[in-house]
Image (cartoon, grey):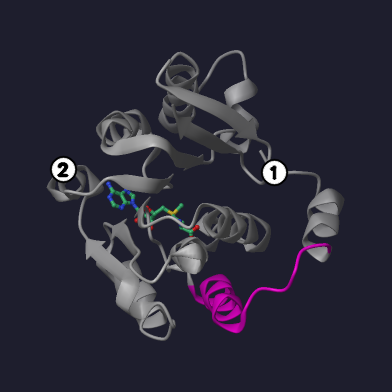
């Protein structure tokens, strides 16, 4: 669900400007990518940056790199010994993201893995401090179930698009993605291992803390 346009504009006018590389990724994506609407955008990007600065996470996992915008935002708070892994299925998007990562001052801390996240996640032997799920909606519950056991108490998981353009509010859910997101939200809501808050930012962001 997206906010009314005037609220969205007011919010973005009262956010700090993005740093030049992030502005470039956003502009490049908007001009060249047929699915540019998938990018997190400036407001959500700044929120990801702020959360990363607050948490100073040593290990970040992102599922769904796209053109690299949100990964660069999430990397903002990495300490010197921190690493961010980001997973992208589409080779073309992975190549675009890597070209931007190569120009980041955090480039040595960014690990872009191309392939299906469902196969890659079990091979990563890390304990995650911050996870961002932003890929195929039908796999959200599987990603969550794979990752919550690999998170220490006090670490955080964010899931994007949890309002799914407002479709989760409909009495009868139509598409498979809306159904999957509604099932994910119910799954998280019923999980005693975590505490969650649904933020009505952009298309809905679920902020989840492992207890
Ligand atoms: C909404 S976009 C991610 C946007 C990005 N996080 C951002 O804010 O800039 C979703 C991405 O997930 C990728 N994706 C979808 N299913 C995937 C899977 N099973 N494994 C890895 N990547 C996947 C898509 O190719 C797409 O680039």
Q: Main secondary structure of the magenta part?
A: helix
Q: Which mark is residue 174?
A: none
Along the polypeptide, which appears first: circle 1 or circle 2?
1
Callout in the foreground (1, 2): 2
Q: Is residue 142 visible?
A: yes
Picture residue at 21% right of the left edge, 46% below the top: 121
Q: CA distance from mark 1 to mark 2?
A: 34 Å
Q: Which mark is residue 122?
A: 2
Any magenta on residue 9? no
Residue under label 1: 2
Q: Where residue 46 sits: x, y (%)?
A: 64, 61
Q: Is residue 104 above or below residue 45?
A: below
Quarter of the figure with residue 152: top left
Which quarter of the image is occupied by the N terminus?
Answer: top right
Judged from the image, the secondary structure of the residue bearing numbered disc 2 is: helix
144 or 82, which lies in front?
A: 82
Picture residue at 52% right of the left edge, 20% below the top: 173
Does residue 41 appear to the left or right of 32 in the view shown?
right
Picture residue at 43% right of the left edge, 68% below the top: 68
Q: Where residue 138 sits: x, y (%)?
A: 35, 33
What segment is highlighted magenta in the picture?
A: 14-32
Q: Is residue 170 above or below residue 111?
A: above
Judged from the image, the secondary structure of the residue bearing numbered disc 1 is: loop
Q: Is residue 34 visible?
A: no
Q: Where residue 148 sits: x, y (%)?
A: 32, 32
């Amino acid at each position: 669900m997206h906010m009314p346009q005037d609220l969205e504009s007011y919010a973005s006018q009262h956010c700090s400007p993005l740093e030049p590389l992030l502005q470039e990724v956003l502009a490049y994506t908007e001009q060249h990518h047929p699915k540019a609407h998938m990018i997190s955008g400036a407001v959500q990007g700044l929120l990801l940056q702020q959360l990363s600065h607050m948490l100073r996470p040593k290990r970040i996992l992102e599922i769904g790199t796209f053109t690299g915008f949100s990964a660069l935002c999430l990397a903002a708070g990495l300490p010197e010994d921190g690493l961010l892994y980001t997973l992208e299925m589409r080779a073309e998007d992975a190549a675009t993201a890597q070209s931007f990562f190569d120009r980041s001052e955090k480039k040595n801390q960014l690990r872009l893995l191309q392939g299906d996240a469902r196969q890659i996640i079990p091979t990563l032997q890390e304990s995650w401090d911050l996870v961002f799920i932003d890929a195929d909606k039908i796999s959200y519950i599987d990603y969550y179930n794979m990752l919550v056991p690999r998170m220490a108490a006090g670490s955080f998981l964010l899931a994007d698009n949890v309002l799914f353009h407002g479709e989760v509010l409909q009495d009868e859910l139509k598409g498979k993605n809306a159904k999957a997101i509604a099932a994910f939200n119910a799954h998280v809501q019923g999980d005693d291992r975590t505490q969650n808050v649904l933020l009505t930012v952009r298309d809905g962001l679920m902020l989840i803390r492992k207890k």
